[in-house]
Amino acid sequence: MAAIAFTQTHVYTKQAGPKDKDKYCIQCLECSDRNIYVGTRDSTVQYLTLDQTQTQAKAQAQARECRTRKLGPSSPIQQLRAVPLFSHLLVLWEQCVAALNMFSLEPIPGLKAIQHSSCMEVCGRSSTSSSSTPQAPCHREGDSVELITASSRRKSVRIHAVWVDRWEVLREVSLPQDPVSLAVDGSCVCIATVDRYHLVNYHAGSMLELFPHDRSRHQGAMVVPTGGGEFLLNAPGSLGMFVMSTGTCQRPPLPWPREVLAAAVCYPYVLALQPRGLSVYSLLDHTLKQTVALDGARGPVPGPEGVLVFTDRQIWALSLVPLQEQVQALVICQSLDEALFLLDGVQSHLPQHSYQELHKDISYLAGMHQFNQGAFDAAKELFIAGDLDPREIISLYPDMRPCLGDEGFVSRRGETTVGQEVTDLARLQREDAATYRLCLDFLADYLAVVRATGRGGPREAVDCALLRVYTEQGAPGEGGALRQLVASPNACRLDRCVSVLEHYNRYFVLGMLYQSHGNHVKAIKTWVKIADGHFEDPSCPDVYEHIVSTLTTQDIDVVWMFAEWALQKNQEVGVQIFTKHQQENNDQNTFGAEEILKFLKNYPQASLFYLEFLINKEKSETEGYHTDLALAYITQTLQAFSGQDEPPEAGETRGKLQELLWSSTSYDVPAIHQRIMATGLHVERAIVLGRSGDHTQALRVLVHEGREPHAAQAYCHRAAQERSHVSGPGDAAGLRQTLLLTLLTTYLCSDTLASEALELLGDEALRFPPGRVLELLPGAWSVGLVCRYLVGSLRETLHRRRMGALQRALAHAEYLRHKVLWTQASKTMVRVHRGQKCQACQKELTEAFIRTVGGQLLHTSCTNTQNH
């Protein structure tokens, strides 16, 4: 580790007396805030206080002797524990726990010594107290603390409640072996017996056996609480094992050296005491951070600002260097990753403001280091994690500095504790274009993340810089990112971005930028110049379609401003500014159909498309629209087939015309008939005649003028289909039969159409009534000519007759089944008791009743209701 974690300070030395009398030797130590209690080998309890002394370097603490109390013969004091709540000092001496006053060292009246105790611990004991002066702290009546003692004689653990003037045993838990040491965290006690560790939950009275310890080693068993329900145990194999109160391990073991005598925890470090010094390990990464040389040390104790370590006659203070100073020292030594790791680990132990400032500074420095090394992904993560002002990074790029504007931004470079050499991007841009492009890609990725999260400095600087980066990159993929940027709500300043887009010929994006700022007219004018070839911008080949799509969402004034230009470019696409505009804004009647049709008079194709929109989409029933559309279809069809004696098979437009004449009931029939009377559109003329009810004349037109027998047959079916939409399938079947007979009569009236008549009879045999057909057929025709019709008709007649007989048989069988059920029910004796009730109305059967098939008895009057 580049920075030290603890500083060593001498606190106290017991001066040696005459050799034949001086038996002073520190056996144990206890610290409560700035009060130190020493237990010696000769049964003496000594009270010291730490006083601040100012030196040239810094303030140091020196212990001053206050009081001393001799407890008895020369037996060592085994343990000392302070209870600041009651100003008690608990002393374990000669297998007994006694209570003294923390300041006078006088025995506490009423607290009789607890016998047969080999070790003890106070639940919730803290290394510091809120009292820094020798004054008794305030406590409420009834307050108590818990004292845990272990007895080798009883092989048990006892839990005592301690009050200011008494204590009593609350619970006792038996142990399988003699206890050696113990530690407490909450309601859990971790106990080391002669060969293994145990976890005891004294509230639940449960015990969990852990792993054994190495009895052959010099240091033996050791239990140290680390906080948060966790204990540090000395495990076999020179390992410090971390065990939770549940018996599980949530972090790996600590590989410490052999001959560890004792240990203490001062977050985020563990101090392992050895015969010639201490080793300081990190709880965060379990690595050795510092070694402190100290011969003859006997044990560490948590102190007010770190750890107190005592030898036979001396006390040393290992003061924890403030965490902020440790982090800053690592930064100075360029150990940036280690500094971030330490800072994140001790976040909960630092003021939030200090943590945020340190984290921001270190993240910036570490990110700049990674940036200089070309590790852009790592740099981006560090900048984001440190909540860095993105203008710091934007200012590194010479071309991007205009994006910062004049907001008065001052870079923090030079304010941090360590200077960072930043890559000269201006030189890199001149000498290594490929590497500079990688730097541009990093800036784009970083600013995109900042923009998405909404963190960082002013939005204007971020958006302007992103626009400039995307524009300079110029790749197709980034073109999409550039469009997405300007299409979404953005803070791009026109005065900073327009010149950039014009310089790189990004006129289409320039129009989108105008549009995002509400200047729709200027945006469309910019795109119009691209479509007309005044601006070159190959990034948008479909600019005309985009203009039309944009106009569909604009106000009526804007649409009229560009309507003529759009229609002159392409009537089929341009008319969408009216059709889609009405579809998307159907709640706002911004356009009048008559006004639009008047405008489209000079654009026939667009007019036709708009009429189709009114009829097919808007479902308009206005006669003029239907008539105009039909006339437009007729004109277009005749123009397509001009110069030919007879038009070929109906094309797309002719199909639309025929469908309109069939389905529409709103056009002017005489006007349409007058328009097509002298043309070769015989099918259309027949449809119009049929619309007026003259089906006979329509069939004659198709047969004699149009020479289209299949069209005549199709006409019969379509006319019947249209009738079914109005009158139902019954009338449609009758009309179809009538039309087919009329068509057959028309064929039979001409000797040249005999083959068509025979073909019609064969195709529609099922639809012709045999009697009526036989009356119409010429007497000269043989049976062989009409054999196909006769066979089909007879088969249909026979099929219908057999189907009718089958249906009658099924109905008769159903009748017989019901009759059998009725007969069986009527012959069954029914016993009716007095007071028996109707199953429907629940009244007594005092009048006529019946019995149902299911056996229910009902009044005859209730039968209809039940059936209903």
Image (tube, helix red, strand yellow):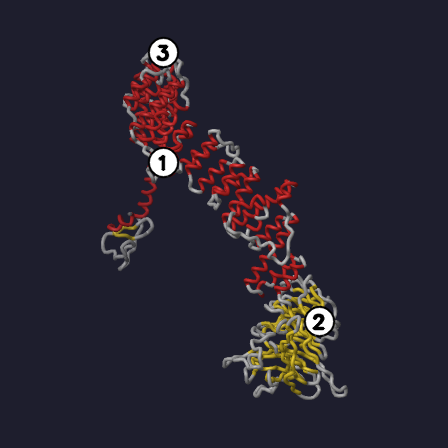
Q: Nearer the viewer, mark 2 or mark 1?
A: 1
Residue tagged by mark 1? 557
In the rendered image, the quadrant that contains the N terminus is bottom right
Label drawn at residue 401: none
Task: Decide which of tag 3 and tag 2 comes sooner along the chain.
Answer: 2
Q: Is residue 507 left or right of residue 216?
A: left
507 and 547: which is toward the camera: 507
Please name the residue shown 36% across and 16% down the image.
Answer: 680
Query: Of the residues shown, which amino acid type is indicated by label 3?
Result: Thr
The percent coordinates of residue 552 (x first, y second) are 40, 36
Please name the residue shown 67% across and 85% down the image.
Answer: 44
The percent coordinates of residue 730 (x first, y second) are 30, 30
Residue tagged by mark 2? 273
Residue 823 showing in the rendered view: yes
Q: Is residue 66 above or below residue 198?
A: below
The percent coordinates of residue 851 (x first, y second) are 29, 50
692 and 846: which is toward the camera: 692
Label 2's element? strand
Q: How many marks?
A: 3
650 and 346: which is toward the camera: 346
Query: Looking at the rendering, which quadrant does residue 229 occupy?
Result: bottom right
Residue tagged by mark 3? 752
Query: Of the residues shown, which amino acid type is indicated by label 1?
Result: Asp
Mark 2 crowd level (few <14, some 14–19, many ≥20, 10 Å Cα): many
Query: Of the residues shown, which amino acid type is indicated by label 2?
Result: Leu
- Residue lying furthest right in this view? 20
Label 1's element? helix
Q: CA distance from mark 3 to mark 2?
A: 126 Å
Task: Decide which of tag 3 and tag 1 comes sooner along the chain.
Answer: 1
